[in-house]
Image (tube, rainbow, N blue to C red):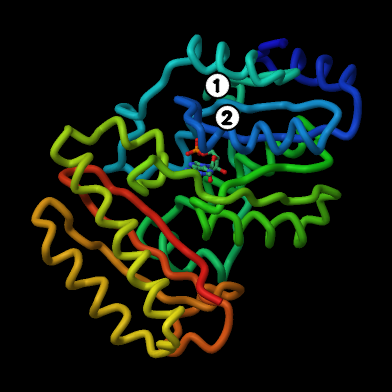
Amino acid sequence: MQTVVELNDLQASRAALAEPVGLVPTMGFLHEGHLSLVRAAREQCASVVVSIFVNPTQFGPNEDLAAYPRDLPRDFALLEKEGVDLVWAPTPEVMYPAGYQTWVTVKELTGHLEGALRPGHFQGVTTVVAKLFNATRPHKAFFGQKDAQQVAVIRQMTRDLSYPIAIQVCPIVREADGLAMSSRNIYLNPQERKAAVVLFRSLTTASQLYEQGQREVAPIKAAMEEIFHQEPLARVQYISFADAQTLAEVTELDRPSLVSMAVYVGKTRLIDNQILG
Ligand code: AMP
């Protein structure tokens, strides 16, 4: 496994890779969720490239950029075991040299959900992913359903900018109790960690009601809110029911729908989601 930092080293190593090439973009501090993407890429592609970059432009001014967990030596060891060919871990200066001024923006889709609450977040995401696509020229790129809106936005960008890249979406990997794996789970103290299962419990309730035939959003949302009321360490920022394609809010589940949420557990902001239908 090669590890590179500089763009010219990346390009030289990329040129020597067997094709098709699979790319797994990450911010590092890897867990089984990331590794599930790497394994999918390993199965489907002749070569696997993983990028590790805590992208400053997708963090808001009051978000956790400085505190975001990092452990490159551990990440490299995990990726080596998975048979990854090439790891690109650029510095912010490599990605955004002095004088940088070009941005990629997806419009409507980023006006909802996370995009509405985190101004500039998706512009940072699409810009960095476009740069990763340009530099690594993958045939397939692997993303997690954990970040459902990110998947929709990247699919849109890939279509709109005519990238010849297949976007592969992998299911959410969860801890034994149902908590979606996330690098940010490290912020949770033991009490908060226990409380954090409430997101999954609320999604399970939503699925059960849906399976029983409920198609009205209001009673499902009320049942979810009731579950959160019973967990004093959790504070809901939003629970959304949206059209899975457009991400516009819906009141009836008469089409494939995305139920998604952002919840503070203590000071840690967690997101989770599920597709209904
Ligand atoms: P991140 O390092 O958080 O930017 O995540 C890198 C990629 O891993 C993204 O495509 C995420 O959606 C995906 N990912 C993160 N957590 C999970 C998870 N629990 N299950 C599946 N994919 C995940």
Q: Amino acid at mark 1?
A: Glu
Label drawn at residue 96: 2
Q: Which residue is mark 1?
A: 93
Residue 183 rendering spot, x and y as whole percentages: 40, 33
The reply, left or right, for residue 29 in relation to residue 232 is right
- 174 or 12, which is in the foreground? 174
**Residue extending furthest toward the left:** 232
Q: Amino acid at mark 2?
A: Tyr
Q: Residue at x 39, y 74 (%)?
A: 208
Give the quadrant of the C terminus.
bottom right
Q: Are marks 1 and 2 in contact (CB under 8 Å)?
A: yes
- 137 or 37, which is in the foreground? 37
Q: Residue at x 59, y 20 (%)?
A: 90
Residue 99 rendering spot, x and y as whole percentages: 57, 31
Q: Quadrant of residue 66?
A: top left
Residue 117 rendering spot, x and y as whole percentages: 35, 61
